[in-house]
């Protein structure tokens, strides 16, 4: 059975946008008719697909509005797509604003199109702390016909923070295994000025405070590893502060800022260890990307990260905020080739648990359940 599916997500760079876009593309490959309803073209949606339609939400910039009415415009767009294309299901990524807009859109269209809402983390772990927003989150979730969370940790946190009776199903994130493979581009290390002797740690994020790039630098600084290098990939609000910190710490020769990159698989493949020491992380898609690329991770024990990385098997899980434990875990991996190789092999096997085929099938089953009930 194939369906007409509307997908709402943040189209810009970020795990939830990547996941929603990859899911849409895989569903389209399986014959579903997929409609992305977003503010701009999702960044990974770069190839034409006959089963995919992109509906752009154009925000009215009328100067009388102090705040452009994005949520309202998105809801109206959802209503118009429901009416024009007869959607069978709407998949909202994030409770706020997307699940709420899905509910408003279906109400405006005067239909009962089922809504599947996927929680990705920050809507619960950050926005959920704001008492003023809680009713909106709860409304979006109560209006949903099915709710999924990307980790058991996020499911627990949603029950604790928002409401304990919400029927949440855990569907872990997946990666496109044709993209994340241990394929080395032999010229790439050289292009970043890296020699064969260099031991390379990599961190990839949006440089927001929650990612604790400062702690990554502190741990890297503490490590006693000859020829150590740190590749920092991404950009975001703390970039300027992190550049200054690198200078203050005298690490200019060892830290390479690679900037925002859309295809990170090749950069992961030239690295020896991946590091992610976030204070909050519902899943940590990048740790899975590293694992599938054959790079062991050192991660904090935040949120869902321990569901992705198994301590002592395919990486190390260290306490949140602890730079010295992170430093010694990175040091162990960077100085011990056989340990690295063992973790790499374990990780490659484990990453198959997050294979796109199985996880897309779980979403398909959920669509069938909400459409037929
Ligand atoms: O981590 C971010 O700041 C971006 C955010 C997003 O919207 O992509 O990531 C969240 O969703 C990802 C996909 O499910 C998860 O892998 C990230 O762990 C989650 N981020 C946080 O919980 C902080």
Image (cartoon, helix red, strand yellow):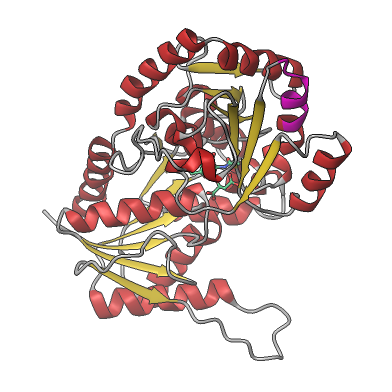
Is residue 296 something that shows in the picture? yes
Is 115 drawn above or below residue 15 in the view shown? Answer: below
Point out the residue furthest to the left here.
1
Front one among 68 and 349: 349
Left/right placement of residue 350 relative to residue 38 reads: left
Left/right placement of residue 194 relative to residue 227 reads: left
Q: Residue at x 42, y 57 (%)?
A: 92
For residue 219: magenta?
yes
Is residue 165 something that shows in the picture? no
Looking at the magenta stretch, what is its main secondary structure? helix
Left/right placement of residue 288 relative to residue 4 reads: right
Query: Could you say which quadrant of the image residue 198 lies in?
Result: top right
Q: Position of residue 289 (x, y in %)?
A: 43, 36
Query: Could you say which quadrant of the image residue 361 lies in?
Result: top left
Front one among 291 and 148: 291
For residue 145: magenta?
no
Q: Residue at x 48, y 36 (%)?
A: 268
| Magenta-colored span | 217-224
């Amino acid at each position: 059975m194939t369906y007409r599916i509307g997908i709402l997500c943040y189209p810009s760079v970020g795990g939830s946008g990547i996941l929603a876009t990859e899911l849409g593309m895989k569903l389209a490959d399986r014959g579903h008719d997929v409609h992305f309803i977003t503010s701009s073209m999702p960044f990974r949606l770069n190839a034409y697909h006959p089963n995919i339609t992109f509906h752009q939400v154009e925000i009215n910039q009328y100067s009388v509005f102090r705040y452009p009415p994005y949520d309202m415009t998105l809801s109206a767009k959802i209503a118009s797509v429901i009416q024009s294309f007869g959607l069978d299901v709407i998949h909202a990524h994030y409770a706020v604003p997307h699940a709420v807009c899905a509910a408003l859109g279906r109400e405006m269209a005067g239909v009962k199109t089922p809504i599947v809402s996927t929680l990705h983390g920050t809507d619960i772990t950050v926005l959920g702390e704001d008492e003023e927003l809680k009713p909106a989150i709860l409304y979006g979730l109560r209006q949903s016909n099915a709710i999924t969370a990307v980790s058991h940790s996020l499911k627990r946190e949603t029950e604790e923070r928002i409401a304990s009776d919400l029927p949440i199903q855990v569907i872990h994130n997946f990666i496109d295994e044709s993209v994340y493979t241990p394929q080395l581009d032999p010229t790439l290390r050289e292009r970043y000025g890296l020699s064969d002797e260099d031991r390379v740690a990599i961190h990839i994020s949006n440089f927001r405070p929650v990612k604790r790039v400062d702690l990554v630098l502190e741990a890297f600084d503490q490590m006693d590893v000859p020829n150590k290098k740190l590749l920092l990939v991404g950009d975001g609000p703390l970039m300027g502060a992190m550049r200054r910190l690198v200078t203050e710490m005298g690490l200019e020769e060892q830290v390479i800022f690679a900037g925002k990159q859309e295809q990170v698989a090749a950069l992961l493949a030239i690295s020896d260890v991946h590091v992610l020491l976030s204070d909050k992380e519902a899943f940590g898609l990048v740790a899975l990307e590293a694992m599938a690329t054959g790079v062991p991770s050192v991660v904090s024990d935040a949120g869902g990260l321990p569901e992705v990385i198994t301590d002592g098997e395919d990486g190390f899980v260290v306490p949140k905020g602890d730079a010295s434990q992170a430093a010694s875990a990175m040091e162990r991996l960077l100085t011990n080739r056989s340990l690295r190789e063992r973790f790499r092999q374990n990780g490659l096997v484990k990453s198959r648990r997050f294979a796109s085929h199985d996880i897309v099938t779980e979403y398909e089953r959920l669509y069938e359940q909400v459409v037929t009930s």
